[in-house]
Amino acid sequence: MFIAGQWVEAEDGSVREVFNPATGEVLATVAEGGLADVRRAIAEARRAFDESDWPQTPVVERARLLHALADKLEERAEEFAVLETENCGKPLRESRFDVNDAVNCFRYYAGLINKPLGQTYEVSDPMMTMVVREPIGVCGQIVPWNYPLLIAAWKLAPCLAAGNTTVFKPAEVTPLSAIKLFELIEEVGFPSGVANLVLGAGPVVGHELAASGLVDKVAFTGGTATGRSIMQAAAGNLKKISLELGGKSPNIVFADADFEAAVEFAMFAIFANQGQVCSAGSRLLVEDSIHDRFVEALVERSRKIRVGNGLHEGTEMGPLISPAHLQKVLQYIEIGKAEGATLALGGKRLTDGEYARGNFVEPTIFTDCTPDMRIVREEIFGPVLAVLRFRDEEEAVRLANDSDYGLAGGVFTQDGAKALRVIKRLRAGITWVNTYHPTYNEAPWGGYKQSGIGRELGTYGLDAYTEIKQINVNLQVGPLGWYRND
Ligand code: NAD
């Protein structure tokens, strides 16, 4: 762990083993932080915010540090990509993409922070009002295991750009790329106490970040149930909160879509990162008239997906993150069968040969799904697709919005007006037309409904790490004349 510029073990000496999900091998043994460790890190971050000149550091200096971090990460991109794949299983080409995106995220906020952020108003003579943005203070940042490095960049870049200090906590099972990233943070010379890394269990270390009265903001990415408990814990000192939570996103294919493109994007929507993507297109809605032909093509192509160790070039789908998560996904597959959905593809754990020691599951597709089924309503977070059919635009929109979640959604059609009509009615924060999944540092990321509160990335993501202050200035100083002077 990295606290106040020092690499430290847990105060009570606890450690945790970190596994490779493709092979079951132990990759590393890391410190397992506890309450004492996180409290010390919070105190150091507090001190760095309150007593050092970090919050007042000129923005050009903060931008320089972020650029230097981006450059170092870029120089070592392949090493980070391999480590990410070893620790979280995703195919190497996906990890390379994540590293590149993380580099760009640091550069984006390095560039944004020295652009004008304030406003001035000519209110009423002789007054002038200025609006300025200031850092919030100490931030607790808690992230999941599915994009360990990329989400670290999404959290750290705007937080540090804005002049906050942070205590950052990676997921228990995927701390390795964060540890390496903090080595670079040390190398580029962020001042002591500004960026702290604490490892450990969510209900202990994460909960303390959410509950501590010394933390001003908690930013969380993870499951919706955890998000709810963080919101409750944060109520004590009315922390600012940002929550990026789960999803069950609809991908709508109309009969007039480019057939081949829609088939491949439907696969990419659910099978990228083994379906462990908050914005995965896990509900596929297909128009009646092409439904059977579409499903047939989808099943045939998905059957050929190359499942394997993410380190092997050519692997298209890796293992699930852990044995426990594998069990959860397999249970959902049993639930789907019991609910009466038709298992059109997959459904089994892969155990032959090199699969035996990893957490591999087949790409899985259920058809004949109905809106009340649990496999349609609940986030499975694995390579399990639920296909539903619809008759017309009206029904497509109704089915798409029939969810507690509202993170993302896609529409495939060659009718531009129809695409926009449907997108405008989708109750979701991230949407796509004739594509699925691309996202950019420039645009806000976040969900409607129970998919979260607030937005990351873009200018919105920087706003989320600033307080807003109005400064009213009297340009003609003199007595007010409000009170009698006799
Ligand atoms: P999770 O909620 O179990 O854990 C996420 C993080 O929270 C981990 O670091 C964990 O240690 C910590 N945590 C757990 N319990 C806690 C508690 N009581 N208090 C404070 N922190 C606690 O989620 P996960 O299984 O790691 O990740 C999968 C979930 O993340 C999925 O639901 C997925 O949709 C969501 N996710 C959302 C986004 C998004 O941007 N909306 C992105 C990626 C993942």
Image (spheres, grey):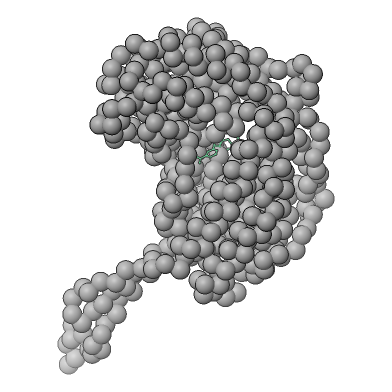
Can residue 211 be seen from the camera position used here?
no
User: Based on the displayed image, in which of its 4 quarters is residue 29 positioned?
Assistant: top right
User: Based on the displayed image, in which of its 4 quarters is residue 213 positioned?
Assistant: bottom right
Residue 283's place in the image compared with 28, above or below, is above
Given residues 129 and 295, the one toward you in this image is 295
Q: Residue at x 56, y 31 (%)?
A: 272
Residue 167, percent from left and from top? 62, 56
Residue 104's place in the image compared with 274, above or below, is below
Residue 96, percent from left and from top? 63, 43
Quadrant of the displayed image that contains ligand 1: top right
Quadrant, the C terminus: bottom left
Quadrant, the N terminus: bottom right
Can residue 113 be seen from the camera position used here?
yes
Residue 483, percent from left and from top? 19, 84
Residue 419's place in the image compared with 56, above or below, is above
Given residues 279 and 210, the one toward you in this image is 279
Given residues 303 and 207, the one toward you in this image is 303
Q: Residue at x 54, y 43 (%)?
A: 221
Q: Is residue 60 left or right of residue 197?
A: left
Q: Is residue 42 left or right of residue 217?
A: right
